[in-house]
Image (cartoon, rainbow, N blue to C red):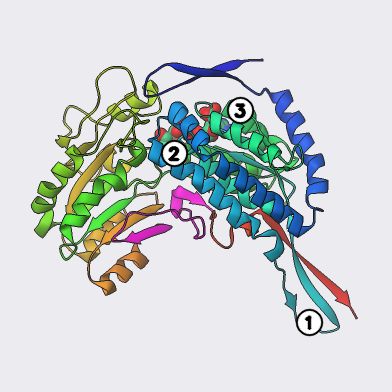
Amino acid sequence: MTTAQVVNPATEQVVTTVELTGEAETDAAIERAQRAAIAWREVAPGDRARLLRRFADAVDADVEHLAQLEVANSGHTIGNARWEAGNVRDVLHYAAGIPERLLGQQIPVAGGVDITFHEPLGVVGVIVPWNFPMPIAAWGFGPALAAGNTVVLKPAELTPLTAVRLAELALEAGLPEHVFQVLPGKGSVVGQRFVTHPAVRKVVFTGSTEVGTEIMAGCARQVKRVTLELGGKSANIVFADADLERAAATAPYGVFDNAGQDCCARSRILVQRSVFDRFLELLEPAVRGVQVGDPAQESTEMGPLISAAHRERVAAFIEPSTKVAFTGKRPDGPGFWYPPTVVLPDSPTDRVLTEEVFGPVVAVLPFEDEADAIRIANDTEYGLSGSIWTNDVGRALRVSRAVEAGNLSVNSHSSVRYWTPFGGFKQSGLGRELGPDAALAFTETKNVFIAT
Ligand code: TAP
């Protein structure tokens, strides 16, 4: 059995060692999940709902413990980590409403009765990245379980601890064995097996567009269902008529939350030229004021990056020629720290404008008018999220409709609510998670005609 060390990114100390699942063990787990799926789909809807509610309650009772684990494993601030554990609870409670409301249709036909059913797929494989280990896992396994599927879940190699704990809580809550299994291991081993094993009927993948593309190609060989949540390069568009003070005060939190390791990070701030200089003046103290440091402290607003290798990757975006406007603070000593950094790109082809940095680096650039703002916002192959700051409701709606992204917010930076749909346009992904239709992505629609 191979093992991997789990490292605290704020201290660089080893937290624990986990055993990595190999290929044969992955196959065995998938086959156990396949057998468990036969009984799970037959559990009465009300009983499946009750079990999911008990799972949600078990998570609720464990929120503080899960949050502390995430602080130690991922370097998330304690405030964020509590929200993340609470999000798992909320997703499960919402999912508990699904089994009794997975309604088919009765469609008028001649000569009989026509009805549709939403049948579970069987085994669903969920592949999770390291940036939000708990919520992203739950967005997959919550509705998948509710719709009558069994789940095998692979956490990121760097951040397995909370997923392992969630599997324990599921068993403690009374979910039958093998209905929800967590398999820590490598993407190239466990994740790949989810793609190639024919008993896995759907793969839900969140991570880089590069790996997502490979997964989609692999799944295509078996016409396997796939949901992809990939990268982003979201725009935060600030019009001259906006509440500029509020837009500037909140902009750092729209991009530096989770140290910028967020697919929804508003990493391009587009500001109307007439207020560009004033906006930068207001932004500077807001960025310098971001509290960066020990993620276990209640007052901390930004923790470290996930690893030394990732910090190198982020740092490489700042080339000697890059115009850095100003930076925030970073602690000295051990930890994979990187300061909040604001850059003023010279050209639309600068890497910092075209690639996902996945770190606390934001580019600020001017635009002329509404059409120019929309053009720049859409000048990317990504399309996940974004914000629009204006006090003109007509403009807010026109720009919201024109920006090619799945999740937009006006005068706000929120992207995620467990009861509203989430997902990307273009290369940011395929399919939607969360919201009222989440369960349908884990079913096949079956049509039955009965002659009368
Ligand atoms: P990825 O390399 O895409 O990894 C995401 C998940 O996929 C991990 O669990 C990974 O396992 C697994 N995986 C890797 N290669 C695989 C393969 N060939 N087959 C099946 N599964 C595979 O992302 P990352 O390393 O976490 O981050 C790299 C970049 O991806 C980031 O810098 C960022 O640009 C982007 N990213 C985006 C998001 C979102 S939410 N859009 C989230 C995370 C990362 P291992 O842990 O073993 O590698």
Q: Nearer the viewer, residue 118 or 199?
A: 118
> Which residues make up the magenta segment?
405-430
Marks 2 and 3, how far apart in space? 20 Å
Q: What secondary structure is found at the residue carrying circle 3?
A: loop
User: Within 10 Å of the Cα at label 3, are there few (<14), some (14-19), or many (20+) other Cα atoms?
Assistant: many
For the C terminus, give its image quadrant: bottom right
Which residue lies under the disc numbered 1?
A: 109
Which residue lies under the disc numbered 2?
A: 81
Residue 312, position as x, y percentages in the image: 33, 23
User: Within 10 Å of the Cα at label 1, are there few (<14), some (14-19), or many (20+) other Cα atoms?
Assistant: few
Which of the 4 image quarters holds residue 45?
Answer: bottom right
Residue 86, position as x, y percentages in the image: 50, 46
Which three-letter amino acid code belongs to the residue tagged 1? Answer: Val
Extreme-bottom residue of the structure = 110
For the N terminus, give its image quadrant: top right
Q: Would residue 110 be found to the left or right of residue 235 on screen?
A: right
User: Within 10 Å of the Cα at label 2, are there few (<14), some (14-19), or many (20+) other Cα atoms?
Assistant: many
Taken as a whole, is the magenta stretch helix, strand or loop?
A: loop
Residue, x 64% and y 60% (percent of image)? 97
Q: Measured along the vertical axis of the image, is residue 435 above or below residue 253?
A: below
Which is in the foreground here, disc 2 or disc 3? 2
Residue, x 78% and y 45% (percent of image)? 37
Which three-letter amino acid code belongs to the residue tagged 3? Answer: Pro
Q: Is residue 65 visible?
A: yes
Q: Would residue 192 be found to the left or right of residue 83 on screen?
A: right
Q: Which mark is residue 289?
A: none
**CB atoms of marks 2 and 3 within 8 Å:** no
Which three-letter amino acid code belongs to the residue tagged 2? Answer: Ala
Q: Which mark is residue 184?
A: 3
Which is in the foreground here, disc 1 or disc 2? 2
Q: Earlier in the sequence, mark 1 or mark 3?
A: 1
